[in-house]
Image (cartoon, rainbow, N blue to C red):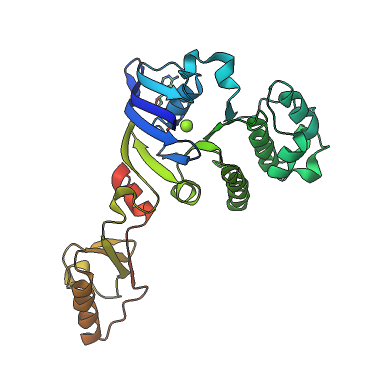
Amino acid sequence: MAAIQVTGLVKRYGEVTAVDGVSLRIEEGEVFALLGPNGAGKTTTVEILEGHRAPTSGEISVLGFRPDKGGRDYRERIGIVLQEGSVERDLTVREALDIYGGMYPKRRSTGELIDLVGLGEKAGARIKTLSGGQQRRLELALGLVGDPDLIFLDEPTTGFDPSARRQAWGILENLTALGKTILLTTHYMDEAQHLADRIAVIARGRIIAEGTPETIGGRADGRTLVRFALPTGVTPEQLPVAGAVVSDGTVTVEASSPTRTLHDLTSWAVSRGLELEHLEVDRPSLEDVYLELTGDG
Ligand SMILES: Nc1ncnc2c1ncn2[C@@H]1O[C@H](COP(=O)(O)OP(=O)(O)O)[C@@H](O)[C@H]1O
Ligand SMILES: [Mg+2]
């Protein structure tokens, strides 16, 4: 059964169309990433699914509810991790989890949540004494306190330094192992690739590609990219292949016949005594696909 089914979702703010006909189906137990640049419509989509904003039009079913009409029965089954903390900062970590947990009929124990997000050493510490990364972890624990079936995470690691991000990913992986349905938004390609079972790329309010991290945007269609550093003293026009793109001294060629392209390149280089530094042959990375799709490249 689908946990989330959306058809033709539109949200307008006056003249601005923030979400422009989005359709999605997310299965139970799936980790789904909505990947897109700032202003793409990610937060608007998620807030409509949470029931915090009303759609302009479109059909939405989340866990069998229409979110803005689901009321308490709906809210008890979803977990929302807020972008900014809204918890009383004089409470300790344990107290905050106990108090929030008391509001749910079904709940995950405080001790288990503290372990899940790795705050064991800080269980008795006041929230205001926690580092930024620790506060985000507490917010994540608070989002899980009602043992939700479905969890919304809006840009869970934006603003984190690389090591805090790695830690957060570890925690999110623990979550995915619990078998929950997760909808996360991100503008980091590597985050979507690392965490998600399926990705939809959104730009200007529309889904422009959808698939697994391996197949999205035709990554599995046998396209091959050949890359190397432009040798010193060589101009792009002198290269023996058509369609080469040079950026920051790196040449990229999309090869429909890679054997032929490599032969042309390497025989040309050898005959001139040139080395093709950093030579690599690869299929397009998710980053290549994303930049192509969103037109930011
Ligand atoms: N309350 C609002 N009023 C008017 N415009 C809004 C409002 N919220 C979002 N928008 C506009 O809708 C578009 C999508 O925003 P948003 O959903 O926040 O994108 P994202 O989360 O992908 O960065 C943007 O152009 C944004 O400026
Ligand atoms: Mg946003």
Image height of 6 relative to 207, above or below = above
Location of the N terminus by quadrant is top left
Left or right relative to 232: residue 156: right
> Residue 107: horizontal and vertical position, in percent?
69, 29
Residue toward you, 90 or 269: 90
> Which residue is found at the position 55% from the left and 20% from the top?
74
Q: Can residue 162 be seen in this view?
A: yes
Left or right relative to 54: residue 153: right
> Residue 100: horizontal and vertical position, in percent?
72, 25
Residue toward you, 249 or 293: 293
Left or right relative to 187: residue 75: right
> Residue 136: horizontal and vertical position, in percent?
65, 38
Instruction: Name the image quarter holding residue 153.
Output: top right
> Which residue is found at the position 40% from the left and 22% from the top?
60
Image height of 283 relative to 21, above or below = below
Instruction: Name the image quarter holding residue 86.
Output: top right
Left or right relative to 38: residue 274: left
> Which residue is found at the position 32% from the left and 58% from the top?
284
Residue toward you, 193 or 265: 193
Image height of 151 relative to 238, above or below = above
